[in-house]
Image: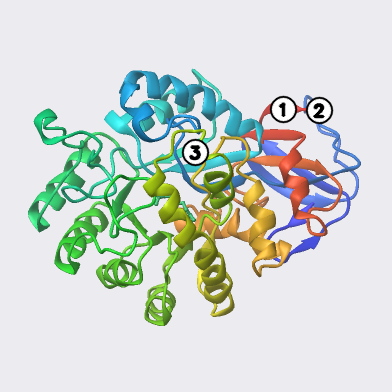
Amino acid sequence: MVDVKRGTLVDDPVVTIVDGVIESVATGQAPQVEGAEYIDLAGKTILPGLIDMHVHLTSDSDMHGYRRLAISDERATITGVVNAQTTLMAGFTTVRNVGAGSFGDVALRDAINEGDIPGPRMFVSGPPIGITGGHCSDNNLLPPEYEAVGENVADGPWAARAAVRKNRKFGVDVIKTCSTGGVLSKGTKVGAPQYTVEELTALTEEAHSHGLKVASHAHGSEGIVNALKAGVDTIEHASFIDDEGIRLAKANGAYLSMDVYVTEFILGEGEAAGILPESLDKERIVGQTQRDNFRKAHEAGVKMVLGTDAGVYPHGDNARQLSRMVQFGMTSAEALRAATANAADALGQTGNVGIIAPQASADIIAVSGNPLADISLLEGVEFVMKSGEVYKSE
Ligand code: ARG
């Protein structure tokens, strides 16, 4: 067993599970308990189920740019049913879904929780909240006569608060906003801030007053700083984070969720997947800087979680990012913590997920070999248990 907190291996672990929850973790011989079911994973290494803090289950990787206009919210939700299963089978027993139309992610989460379909435990944002013409929520693909407006466009502090209230009303667990432009949206600039600090503060205050955390997409340094000044909980992408951003993130205890794998897909297969030429140009500016800043922020001691942006690239390939996090400066143990215990902390789920310990949900995966020596072993998860139920056993 990998002890993710310590970054060490434990020999001969015995995990006792009652009603989907871990009751005890010991070593040596399994106790003889009348009526108990025994699962022997001898020869394998067990770890807590992985957590991806940035996915879009209702999006597929071959549907970018103008292709996306042809997909109804209902169709996207059905896509999400397929991707939820794929993600779980890859060893991700918990995900944070940060952006889905029409609350399709709320529907998916509920269907999974009610046992209708297999999938990871989901924490969902519903439609992201953003500015007119911005990355997040608005639709900039069509000319003005179509009068297309994204689902949760909210300009001004009170409109931002109202959007948070609406999302909460319809069942979200987290608020997603965008404090800079993005790569994959038409006509936005990755360096350009979106929202004023006043707007971001109103949105964050409102979210926090309902116990909801805030995830802010931000590439440019100014928008990163604005979001951190407003008190958001996680920065997504964080590509151009500067010293001020690093200082604020540390001071606030904010987490960075830097998707350092996805650039390989966008620049490699993005064009065939329909990604707009302007987005490919933007990715050429973002990719390497983000990797360099991942190393810098990690060395500076900023807290990090695994967030992949799966959905931009194929679901199920989430674990590929782990080896890149090691390539760009983490130890295997640090990368594993980012994908387990640290992610649980960032979700407000400390001790419930991301750890094999008493009281935690019985979310356990297994691989052959030692992932502390070769993190890429997690790209081939052989056993998946969520809440004590086995979904995969090879
Ligand atoms: N969803 C993000 C955006 O459109 C993807 C950024 C991907 N690029 C990267 N290097 N992380 O901005």
Of callouts 1 and 3, the N-terminal one: 3
Q: Amino acid at mark 1?
A: Lys
* Residue marked by disc 3: 271
Q: Under tag 3, what secondary structure?
A: loop
In front of the other: label 1 or label 3?
Answer: 3
Front-most of 146 and 55?
Answer: 146
Mark 1–mark 3 Cα distance, whole angstroms, equals: 34 Å
Of callouts 3 and 2, the N-terminal one: 3
Mark 1–mark 2 Cα distance, whole angstroms, equals: 7 Å
Ligand 1 within 8 Å, label 3 CB: no
* Residue marked by disc 1: 392
Point 66% across, 52% down: residue: 357
Answer above or below: position of 229 versus 134.
below
Q: Locate the C terminus and report the quarter of the image it occupies.
A: top right
Report whether 118 appears left or right of 69.
Answer: right
Front-most of 364 and 302?
Answer: 302
* Residue marked by disc 2: 394
Q: Under tag 1, what secondary structure?
A: strand
